[in-house]
């Protein structure tokens, strides 16, 4: 667990850690696979990476994936791809071949999930073992688009599933727990007092919430919290 005074300090702490992880990874392998989180929390981190930290990561050797996506066009205001494109990808001019967005224009969401699985198989050849996964958490304890009491949360064979959110856009695509738990490193980024109770339940009571099920089998798990989100622990 890492606790920062403010959300901006949190973003800076994560950016510093990310620089370390990427340079460490690229000393041992040609490419680094990074899974981006959606929602609002990661915006501050992406903006920081694209500006102040732009020279500190070899983006030509980093491949970007998504932990989840809303099943809307990539230019839709709710698209996680669009948020990352505007804050990180366009400003850094990351080469298109390094970007692996979840498709949201397939014949069906299930077809899109299978297409993304194929994309992961093409890149990893086998079970995806991401170098670093960024995740957020909702007040209901969901992470990525693994919402409580949904089939996506129960999925243990497929790598990508169709998620069902209780709020619009309800149809999602999401990496499943087996993939998240195969990662080398998982960072949860959580800010704000509205998440404090959920964070307390997950970290102090191991409540049966989706985010509590993210336990990398052979990897590092770090909860990056600002003081407000850490208010309950
Ligand atoms: C999404 C995210 C989701 C997000 C949480 C927290 O597509 O919405 O992947 O899991 O991380 O809902 O969202 P905020 O960062 O906006 O609070």
Image: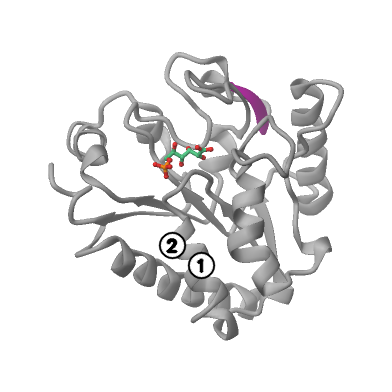
Residue 82 falls within the magenta-colored stretch? no
Question: Few, some or many C-alpha atoms within 10 Å of disc 2 (few <14, some 14-19, many ≥20)?
Answer: some
Q: How is the image coloured?
A: one colour
The residue carrying mark 2 is: 44
The image quadrant where one finds the N terminus is bottom left
* Quadrant in which residue 226 is drawn: bottom left
Relative side of 166 to 84, left or right: left
Measured as percent of width and height from the top left, residue 156 is found at 59, 25
Q: Which residue is mark 1?
A: 47
| Residue in view at x 64 percent, y 76 percent | 26
Can residue 218 be seen in the rendering of this structure? yes
Q: Main secondary structure of the magenta part?
A: strand
Vertically, is 158 above or below 225? Answer: above
Residue 8, x across and y down, in percent: 32, 66
Q: Residue at the spot x=34%, y=26% of the render?
A: 140
Q: Nearer the viewer, residue 157 or 136?
A: 136
Give percent across and percent down for residue 136.
42, 44
Q: Would you call the spot at circle 1 few (<14 residues within 10 Å), some (14-19), or many (20 or more)?
A: some
At mark 1, the secondary structure is helix
Q: Is mark 2 within 8 Å of ligand 1?
A: no
Q: Which residues are magenta?
A: 159-163
Q: Is residue 59 left or right of residue 45?
A: right
Residue projecting furthest to the bottom: 55
Image quadrant containing the C terminus:
top left
């Amino acid at each position: 667990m890492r606790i920062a005074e403010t959300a901006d300090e949190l973003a800076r702490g994560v950016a510093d850690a990310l620089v370390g992880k990427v340079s460490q990874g690229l000393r041992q392998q040609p490419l680094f696979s990074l899974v981006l989180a959606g929602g609002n929390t990661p915006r501050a981190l992406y903006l920081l990476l694209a500006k102040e930290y732009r020279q500190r990561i070899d983006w030509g050797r980093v491949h970007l994936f998504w932990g989840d996506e809303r099943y809307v066009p990539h230019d839709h205001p709710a698209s996680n791809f669009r948020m990352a494109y505007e804050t990180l990808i366009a400003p850094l001019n990351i080469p298109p071949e390094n970007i692996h967005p979840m498709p949201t224009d397939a014949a069906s969401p299930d077809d899109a999930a299978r297409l993304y699985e194929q994309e992961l198989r093409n890149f990893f050849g086998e079970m995806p073992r991401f170098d670093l996964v960024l995740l957020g958490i909702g007040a209901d304890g969901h992470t990525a688009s693994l919402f409580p009491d949904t089939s996506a949360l129960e999925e243990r064979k497929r790598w990508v599933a169709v998620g069902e959110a209780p709020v619009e856009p309800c149809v999602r695509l999401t990496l499943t727990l087996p993939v998240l738990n195969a990662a080398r490193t998982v960072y949860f980024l959580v800010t704000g007092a509205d998440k404090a109770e959920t964070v307390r339940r997950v970290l102090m009571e191991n409540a049966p919430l989706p985010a509590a099920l993210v336990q990398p089998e052979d990897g590092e798990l770090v909860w990056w919290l600002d003081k407000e989100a850490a208010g309950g622990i």
